[in-house]
Image (cartoon, coloured by chain):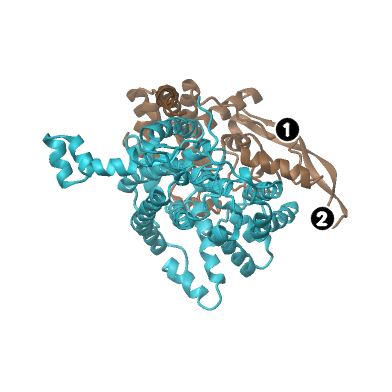
Amino acid sequence: MAAVMEKSGGGFRSWLNKRLPVDQFVADQLTGYYAPKNFNIWYFFGSLALLMLVMQIVTGIFVTMHFKPGEPTAWDSVQRMVREVPYMWLIQPMHAVGASFFFGVVYLHMARAFLYGSYKAPRELLWIIGMLIYFALMAEAFMGYVLPYGNMSYWGAQVIINLFGTIPGFGPDLVEWIRGDYGIGDATLTRFFSLHVIALPFIIALLVLLHLVALRQVGSNNPDGIEIKENLGADGKPKDGIPFHPYYTLKDIVGVGLFLTLFAIVLFFAPTFGGLFMEAPNFEPANPSSTPDHIAPVWYFTPYYAILRAVPDQKLGALLMALSVLAFLFLPWLDRAKNKSIRYRGLTSKLLLAMFFIAFCVLMWLGLKPADGIYVLLARIFTSLYFAFFILLPFVSKADGNGPVPDRVTYHAH
Amino acid sequence: MRTNSIRLIGALALLLVAGAVPANEGGHAGWERKAGNEIANLPSLQRGARNFMAYCSGCHSLKFMRYSRMAADLKISDEQRDKYLVRPGDKFSDYIKASMPAADAQEWFGRAPPDLSLVARSRSSDWIFNFLTTFYADPASRQTGVNNLQLPGTAMPHVLASVQGVQNPVWRNVEHKGEDGKAALLREFEKFEAGVPGSMSAEQFDEFARDTVNFLQYVGDPTQVERQGLGIWVVLFLLAFTAIAWMLKTEYWKDVR
């Protein structure tokens, strides 16, 4: 601390640092935080998730200014704001399209952890906090989707809220408690609004903070899955580490540029993304007497929706659906390999992981399709493969995840 | 945009697993067409606005669109707006409401004609185009005497009969295998025959419908042309930004060995 203080000299900066440890914070978190130098493209998605969180909060602030929650006003207020408030035609779709991009980034961020074993010790808690963020984000996105009260909002909410009714015993009472009424209506919308703009954003922000604190504590994993802290130089810094700032701040800015370019292309030229990010039935106001041709959630929920529909029994389907999400929490203990990264695991592990990724993507696609004919059969096959991953992982990882690992990370200077 | 990677992976997997997918989409034998409207075509939008006010606005509202906004966007002068578009009794800043009271409409048609502000987004431009062009004489329809291929059993009468005329359908019988494996004869649309002539030729009417669809697409998302224009500059800026950021990153990363 003293060293930092001396460097900061006199004047305002010194005055400030005596009262608020700005320089110390920057030294701890950025210039003095050593990250492995071999990060690849998969390591962009953490900072991009943070960017999306900020974008959703900022655009959300403006949407909230003009949105009127409640059954009689919600739909009209969204249409009015995009048509009559300057630049809301841009900001409101940013918020809606942003939700899809946020989930896209989060899924890739999670896939990275699968690839390089980033959930393994000592990062179990980091992973679990991350999963809690994911769960909170699902609730946040679901409620946000219901708020504008389009027809798919209404029917989607109908399906999802009724799932809680399958819980034995208190299920039906729970459903009524969530809705605040005997059906989805004004009471449901106003409470969802409160949760969407106050409770959940606070929870998510707190969890993100904890996620970052835990990350600083254990340090980042890397594509080789080697602990860089175990290989220190004479100066006590990791030989394979580089200061987060300026190296990764600059690299992440390149990632941000590429990502925002992609985001802008979708936002300006294909905001509905062919009905995938904004569905056609949601351009009609909620109508309890007119069910859309087929009800499907937005793409980021469809893998679980496909699992739900794969089972003929609704109770069992809801149970499997809950299990399919909760299974992620146990990953650090299901994976019993010595090595973290997929790079240093056998072919069986690689195939098993590939199978899981494919099953997840196919289920995502199946969840968008009607549940009939061949699609039901496919959903059953890929649901089985999805769960087979979690069941087989302890055995496969124990058997072929123990090969030799290099001492230093793989890095080719360019 | 539909061929995103998720669907691609899914489609590949489907091809691998399923040899034959049951064809559940029947042949539409030529009546399903692309609207082919051009959203940046101002004269077409102006004609579409005229068509809408003349033929549609009696029953259908555009409750999120003001006369003033429409006129400003479509470069219609204030004089023309007030003379031809704004309905007597309305102000130029009013939303475009239907002339007919909703309660009466409910009674006369069985259901109130829907607001069309977002119909191009909830249905699609092609859907509206096919709806407008496939009304046909149907004696079985007791209420209106017409039916529609895009929306069978529609409650809407053939409002455009005076311009399009009334066309007669030609059906053919096609054998279909039902779910139970039994063959059944089903009638399938083959083509339209000229019936009662209207004031326009078929080509003129297609153009008329295309302009109207174009206008409704504009109403569904009035900023789309402006948005795409801005989008080009935003994307160009972001590409330049990324290039500079990449050069800066490369310069710093020279130190990393």
Say left or right for B126 vs A63.
right
For the residue carrying disc 2, how many other residues have a C-alpha within 10 Å: few (<14), some (14-19), or many (20+)?
Answer: few
Circle 1 residue: B30
A325 lies above or below B227: below
Q: Quadrant of residue B132?
A: top right
B254, A375: nearer the viewer:
B254
Q: Quadrant of residue B192?
A: top right
Spatial CA span between label 1 and label 2: 26 Å
In the rendered view of the protein, which quadrant contains the N terminus of chain A?
top left
Q: Quadrant of residue B90?
A: top left
Residues under numbered marks 1 and 2 in contact, where contact means CB atoms less than 8 Å apart: no
Report the disc number at residue B179: 2
Q: Secondary structure at mark 2?
A: loop
Say left or right for A388 vs A221.
right
Residue A79 in the image, given as x and y percentages of width and height: 40, 43
Chain on which label 2 sits: B
Report the disc number at residue B209: none
B63, B233: nearer the viewer:
B233
The answer as to whether the residues below labels 1 and 2 share one chain is yes
Residue B126 in the image, given as x and y percentages of width and height: 60, 34
Give the residue type that dot 1 points to.
Gly
B160, A6: nearer the viewer:
A6
Q: Secondary structure at mark 1?
A: loop
Q: Identify the hue of chain B.
A: brown
For the residue carrying disc 1, how many other residues have a C-alpha within 10 Å: few (<14), some (14-19), or many (20+)?
Answer: few
Give the residue type that dot 2 points to.
Glu
Residue A27 in the image, given as x and y percentages of width and height: 29, 41
Residue at (82%, 55%) from the top-left corner? Answer: B179
Q: Identify the hue of chain A.
A: cyan
Chain on which label 1 sits: B
Residue B62 in sight here: no
